[in-house]
Amino acid sequence: MDPGDPEERPAAADPAADTTGGQDPRLFLQTLQTLWSTRELRQLREEAWKGFATLDDPLATLLDMLDASRGFGGQGPSLEAWVARELERWLQAQPRPGPTQGDPALKPLQVRAVRLLTEGPLSLVEPLVSIFQLQDADRSPVLAHIHRLHQEGKFKEAIVLGTKLQLQADLDVEKMCVPLLLQDKVDLVERYVDSLPHLQRRLLTLMDSWCQPGFDIRVVTRRYPHVRLRLERLSPRALGRQVLRLLEQFGLDPALCPSVLAQQRLAALRYLCYKRLVERTMSQESWAELVQDDVAMAAQCALDLSLPEERLPATVVAEMSQLRLQERTAKAPSEHRRDDCYQLPIAREDIYFLASWEDLARHEDALLQPGQVVGVDLEWRPSFGAGGRPQVSLMQVAVAGRVFLLDLPRLSSPAGGQAPQAFSQLVSRLLSDPSITKLGYGMAGDLRSLGASYPALAQAVRKLQGGLDLLQAHRQMRVADRPAPAVDGAAGPRGLSLLVQQVLGKPLDKTQQLSNWDRRPLGEEQLVYAAADAYCLLEVYWALCREPARFHLPGALPWSLGLGCSERRGTQEPPLQKASASPRQVRSPEDAAPEVPAQAFRVVCDNMLGGLARTLRCLGVDVRVLHSGEDHRQAAEVARQEGRVILTAGLPYHKLRAQVGAGRCLAVDCSLKAQQQAKAVIRHFNVRVTPADIFSRCQACNCDQYLRVSKDVMKQLVRLSVQPGGPGGAGSEAPHRDGEQETGSALEEAPEGCTYDPPCRWLEDTDLQTRVPATLANGTRLQLAGIPAGVLRRPGLQHFYCCTGCGKVFWEGSHLARVTSNFQEVLEGTPRPASGPS
């Protein structure tokens, strides 16, 4: 019988054919299987519901169908699970009298359902639990099955089954969760302890114990020799971040995790000590105020960093002596005036601190004058706790000749009378008025913090109009121009301070950045710093408008920018203005570096810079990339042994720079795209790149040795690789069919003397170890599967190139034209773009 024949569908079968008085479950399942294979889901649902209605005992019939099925363990969606879910929906939509909890008729059905749970796919768990009310059934068989899964190393299946059946109370949380944590499957662990505070506390206590000083995670991993570990996610720092996130997510007391909190406080103190005593960009008063609440940890931090006691508070020095460690006597440099920094060009009396409704009313016209340009900035007390965003304390609004500092806690306080409403209305009008240009730097993040701190302003933040983020302009400048002096230095300016230096000649003084902005009254230095932070935005904007060409920016400022677009990946940036002179920037004599040819320039990148590595290889640079298991120590060793320059996007920059010397290490700006990073590196190290360098090195493996292969030989190799009986079976190497659209680009006409012609010899028979599969004498197998069939038929294409290192195959296309065009300003003697390898 054909189960798909309408004349012989099982729905019309004789009811006597089945002991249930309804359909034969096998025939019913066959009918649904036919429709399932055609993916006619609407008809499938109609047929299933019609069949359910003919069943005298749908629950028993479902179990009969599942027992009769042989589809368990298959890949992809399961018909059995779909039928179970549909029956669950059908029962909910059309309730019928049936056995209830405690009914003797339900118990044998529950026993059968539990057995199916231990034999079938996980997708059956939820519908069977609901249909057969398994929450209170005898679940000892399921517990035994979970323990068996655990013993077999099927940790994911075990924890999923335990979660869906809510068996957490009967299982050991550490036994269930540890293997998943080792595999970085924290999401499964989160679901396992969801809504169970006692298990959440036990989980976080366990994770916190892994963060104790001196704890060796390998002691735990040895118990699971067959688990595929994610060791990079098991470092105390990575685990600490997970613990802090879960503490906030579960709403638990941070004191539950003392090791992580100590780790976090120590990291914060190290940072503060570095800012104060190494970088010297923080005042003594601000530093002492922030560390005074944790004297013991500050003393330990000072000892770890060998900080001079003469610059430490007396309480910290006393605590250090109690630790019985050797004292350090080196003195930190004394405070000095920052005359080398940006100076606020307005008088002190032009800085207004607004803290009441009367203050707002007095200066409302100046703040909301239509058509003006204002600089906007925010300040908040630095917070190193486990909480969310810090509470914004101060909002600075700079207009020409004046700066207004808005005391946000006072103005938004319900005790402020009319102030909260007046404040909310003023800020809303300021942000929503498209005629007022609002300048910021990293504006999207600042406004998100403002909306989170003061919910009454959240709607106004989302309706911002006329916003211009100078971070966008700064990124364009850093693409078009060489890095500023000391951009790779330990104490070099960053962010807005760097932009101010590049445009106005001097950086911002950031010594008050980490001061206590919740303190009232604010100190005089804080007031001047806050005013300068906002007013410098105006001066930078005016300078960019006056001389956009000097900074390689479009002539019309401001260009159209959406709020926060500078922070979204893949956002289209404004086009660069092409320089009329040589595309390469000439360094001044005092900071000029000796020119180095691209193919002689050798670097080592950390594994966060994979895109930059491929782009530099595209330009002919010798690039080695660290593996995921290697850390900065390997980078320094490789740099010393192989004479390479270190490129890093991580935090260990200062350690690396100390190990390899000045000028041998560069911290790469991760906010830039790979192409922009490559241009900055080329300019910084004065690398000479010529058109002949492009694609002289394999982007995949860094090899610079190619073999040229004629089209006829390549056709033969491809044809042999797909013959029946060859490796992998017919068509395994080249799945492309005649007439399909090729993935390569159409050949472009290259100008005379500018074609892709790397120095390499022709492939000879002696270069091949075997032809099936096509393998070079050094054991490298050619990657023939990546060649579209259409490329082999392309007219004018005479030869291919194969990398002797990895076997990747290249051919002439439009890629070289695009690369040459994208890097035209850093190429020596760039001709009109030509065709190149695809």
Image (spheres, rainbow, N blue to C red):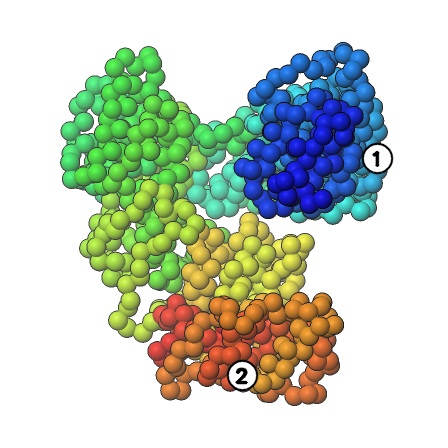
Seen in the image, is 733 located left or right of residue 280? right
Q: Is residue 389 left or right of residue 228?
A: left
Relative horizontal placement of residue 203, taking residue 43 as reference (left or right): right
User: In whole angstroms, how far apart are the C-alphas of marks 1 and 2?
Assistant: 59 Å
What residue is shown with label 1? 148
Category of crowding for the residue at label 2, using alpha-carbon neighbours closer than 10 angstroms: few (below 14), some (14–19), many (at least 20)? some
Q: Residues within 10 Å of mark 1 (few under 14, many from 20)?
A: some
- Residue 194 disc label: none
Q: Quadrant of the N terminus?
A: top right
Residue 743 horizontal/vertical position (percent): 49, 68
Q: Nearer the viewer, residue 524 or 477?
A: 477
Residue pictured at 24% horizontal, 44% vertical = 538
Q: Tag 2, which secondary structure?
A: strand
Local SS, label 1: helix
Between 711 and 341, the one lying in front of the other is: 711
| Picture coordinates of residue 709, whole percent (x, y) | 58, 83
Return the residue at label 2: 799
What residue is shown at x 69% (from left), y 15% (from top)? Answer: 98
Relative to residue 587, is residue 299 depicted above or below?
above
User: The residue under label 1 is which amino acid type?
Assistant: Arg
Q: Is residue 64 above or below residue 536?
A: above
Looking at the rendered structure, the kind of residue marked 2 is His
Measured along the vertical axis of the image, is residue 680 above or below residue 326?
Answer: below
Above or below residue 254? Residue 603 is below
**Residue 758's x, y, as percent?**
52, 82
The part of the image, by quadrant, that contains residue 177 is: top right
Tell me the residue at 66%/39% (across/down).
8
Give how far across and how far down residue 342 sits, in percent.
31, 47
Question: Could you say which is closer to the camera, residue 121 or residue 52?
Answer: 52
